[in-house]
Image (spheres, rainbow, N blue to C red):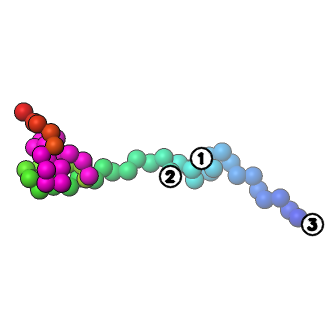
Amino acid sequence: MAVPKGRTSKQRRNKRRASSYTLRKATFVECPQCHEMKRPHRVCMNCGYYNGEKVLDVE
């Protein structure tokens, strides 16, 4: 005869699920134009360049 598995407590269940809610550390790369740190695949807010082209006018 089959024996039911022991019940998983709420605390144990929630500890296992909590790993998917952790925040990831933001990555930064150096801008090739002005050498400031910026997020990858985004316009540099310091100089306004993206992929070697001027995209934004920055004062």
Q: Is residue 45 magenta?
A: yes
For residue 56, above or below residue 33: above
Label 2: few (<14), some (14–19) or many (≥20) C-alpha neighbours in 10 Å: few
In primary-sequence order, the first of circles 2 and 3 is: 3
Would you name the residue on which mark 2 appears? 19
Inspect the image, locate mark 3, and give the three-letter code of the amino acid beneath it: Met
Relative to the observer, which residue lies in front, 31 or 13? 31
Cα–Cα gap, marks 2 and 3: 36 Å
Cα–Cα gap, marks 2 and 1: 9 Å
Relative to the observer, which residue lies in front, 26 or 49? 49
Which mark is drawn over residue 1? Answer: 3
Task: Residue at 48%, 46% (x, y): give it.
Answer: 21
Task: Residue at 63%, 50% (x, y): give it.
Answer: 13
Secondary structure type for disc 2: helix
List x then y, in percent, for residue 20.
Answer: 50, 51
In primary-sequence order, the first of circles 2 and 1 is: 1
Inspect the image, locate mark 1, and give the three-letter code of the amino acid beneath it: Asn
Task: Residue at 18%, 49% (x, y): give it.
Answer: 50
- Asked whether residue 54 appears in the rendered view, the answer is yes
Q: How many marks?
A: 3
- Asked whether residue 37 appears in the rendered view, the answer is no
Q: Which residues are magenta?
A: 41-54
Would you name the residue on which mark 1 appears? 14
The reply, left or right, for residue 25 in relation to residue 38 is right
Cα–Cα gap, marks 3 and 1: 31 Å
